[in-house]
Image (cartoon, helix red, strand yellow):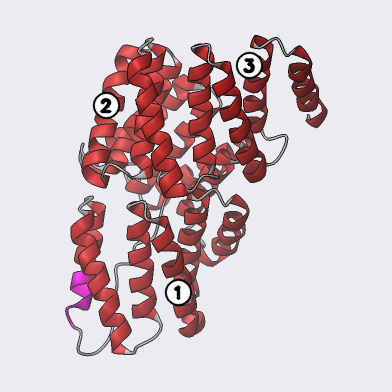
Amino acid sequence: MKLSLLIFCASLAFAGQADWQQRMQEANRLDREGRYTEAQEIYVAALDEAETSGVAGGPLAQSLNNLAAHYFHCGNYALAEPLYRRALEAWKTGGQEFARDRAFTMNNLATLYRALGRYSDAEPLYAAALPLLEPDTGGVWNNLAELYRAEGKYDKAESAARKSIQLAERTDGPESARAAASLHTLGVVYESLQRYDEALALLNRSRQIREKLFGAGHPLTATTLGNMAAVLNAQRRIAEAEPLALQALEIREKALGPDHPDVAVSLNNLAQIERQQGRYVEAEPLYRRALAIWENKLGRDHPDVAKGLCNLADFYHERGRDLAAENLYLRALSILQKSLGAGNPEVDEVSRRLAQVYRAQGRQRKADHIDAAISTLR
């Protein structure tokens, strides 16, 4: 899911560039509306102006941050990271006056690292940003909740998400964009904990707010629709899940293009729903397309790739193709052990699935060895 980023609404930047502020605000508006191609043209032009003006500090840092945040939303993570790093250095040149602004960019860079599966790089940046952003820390707590959820630290994730909701509703109001983001995050935490009714109620509230603020065809609305579909599918409410999954996929492909990582999420969700209905011919190409997008956009060792591998392995196991399933589970385990560490709940779950494959192959000793290893780490 997409996490809270800061897009600066810039103040007047430098003499002779009186329209710079207006055009930057226009780009911010286009980004919020999901009109990414139009926004990018303005962000790039604004950065060119800031660089050629020779004025360091705020204007340059704002331009770098905003273009980086735009690239993040568009799934161009490799382009975003160097811009965020340049923005951090540009804020430094402005001195202590810009410490708070620099903290916002630290939050953004941490969010990028979370999306890239670089969890150990993300948390220190969030921790460093929090004291600098007091009392406006709701967005950082929301991002921390999503980081903890990705790491399988569900107690910490729930606590951080609840704090984020409290802060968002107090500072921005219960019908605000921040409140919607925080409700969504707590909803997906409950989804991970299989507390499906609570998850669905929170996600539906988030959807209602996002549709009101951004419209039914916005990528943020699609994010919530996709998670609602996943929860309904987990409850075997297929007839309700499938139209939501199709709607989310349609919105994302139209707004983000066919190769965005969020499109891969929707493809994977739809594949799960097709599989639940026994539509194996339809499900397999969806799994494969999602996996190809994740590998291309995020790299072959990203945790999302591991999840895609596991889902395809589940599919093969159900179809009796246990050798193919075994190879995919082994690759997924290697990725997850590297990014999450041994003893993580996700690592344990994939290990159990691999043990099931070994049992189906009659390799009981290998299965027992996995079970023993999981018990030892608890």
Percent across and percent down for residue 39 are 22, 61
Examine the structure image and report whether residue 19 is included in the region drawn in magenta.
Answer: yes
- Specify the segment rendered in magenta: 18-23
Q: Residue at x 60, y 54 (%)?
A: 123
Check the picture and name the quadrant holding the N terminus. top left
- Amino acid at the residue labelled 2: Leu
Q: Quadrant of residue 223?
A: top left
- Say if 93 sits above or below 305 in the image: below
Q: Name the residue that disc number 3 marks.
A: 357
- Amino acid at the residue labelled 1: Arg
Percent across and percent down for residue 72 are 38, 55
Q: CA distance from mark 1 to mark 2?
A: 39 Å
Q: Name the residue that disc number 1 marks.
A: 86
**SS of the residue under disc 3:** helix
Q: Nearer the viewer, mark 1 or mark 3?
A: 3
Q: Which label's residue is closer to the chain start, 1 or 2?
A: 1
Q: Residue at x 60, y 35 (%)?
A: 331
**Camera-side residue: 173 or 49?**
49
**Camera-side residue: 224 or 276?**
276
Q: CA distance from mark 3 to mark 2?
A: 31 Å
Q: Which label's residue is closer to the chain start, 3 or 2?
A: 2
